[in-house]
Image (cartoon, grey):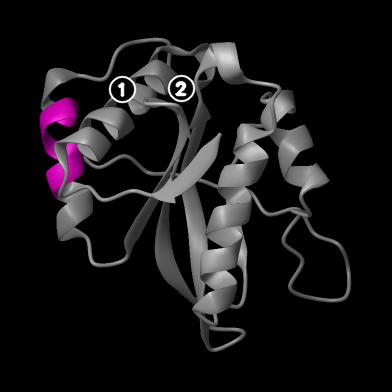
Amino acid sequence: MRIERADLDTARDRDALLSVLDSYARDPMGGGAALPAEVSVAVVPGLLAHPTSRAWLAWQGDAAVGMLVAFMGFSTFRARPLLNVHDLAVLPAFRGHRIGEQLLAAAEAHARESGFCKLTLEVQEQNTRARALYTRVGFGHFAPGVEQNTTLFLEKPLP
């Protein structure tokens, strides 16, 4: 197993990211349906055009078995950049082998080397497997003050 920073300028890494992303989309936690054709066509160019995107791929031999996509953000409370993990996916047959942990470790190493102040992510409450992983590697609830507060991730879709 090896973890590599994705080079989305190469067909190999583009195809690998799309394959793992589509597998995740088909999973109940990813929506339970294949990536729409328009998303499959637009996601890699969108990532390449987004100046703060970062991606890593997990490889077993020549096969991509996991991926992590993150975006740089900024913490106003720490006045430093942060790295937000947007997608973390491992092919079903490879789950339980700590591949997600290795992908998160690669993202964390990048964030530390870049002087970022923290990693952030969102997770569905019912995704107990992912939540256990995130707890195991040190993620916890966001608590800006003295009291421990739970932060909710909300969205407002725009047509």
Does residue 77 lie above or below 132 as drawn? below
Q: Do we see residue 108 in this rendering?
A: yes
Give the image location of residue 54, x and y in percent: 36, 57
For the record, the magenta segment spans: 39-45
Residue placed most toward the observer, 56 or 157: 56
Does residue 79 lie above or below 89 as drawn? below
Residue placed most toward the observer, 99 or 77: 99
| SS under mark 2 | helix
Residue at horizontal 88%, vertical 75%? 146
Name of the residue lying farthest toward the bottom: 79
Does residue 124 lie above or below 34 as drawn? below
- What kind of secondary structure does the magenta stretch mostly adopt? helix
Q: In terms of sequence position, does the residue under pointer 1 or pointer 2 come before the other?
A: 1
Classed neighbour count for the residue bearing mark 1: other residues with Cα under 10 Å, few (<14), some (14–19), many (≥20)? some
Q: Which residue is mark 1?
A: 19
Q: Closer to the camera: disc 1 or disc 2?
A: 1
Residue at horizontal 59%, vertical 74%? 112
Q: Amino acid at mark 2?
A: Gly
Q: Which residue is mark 2?
A: 30
Give the image location of residue 94, x and y in percent: 59, 18
Q: Amino acid at mark 1?
A: Ser
Quadrant holding the C terminus? top left
Give the image location of residue 145, x and y in percent: 80, 76
Label 1 and label 2: CA atoms lie apart by 14 Å
Does residue 158 lie above or below 30 as drawn? below
| SS under mark 1 | helix
Quadrant holding the N terminus? top right
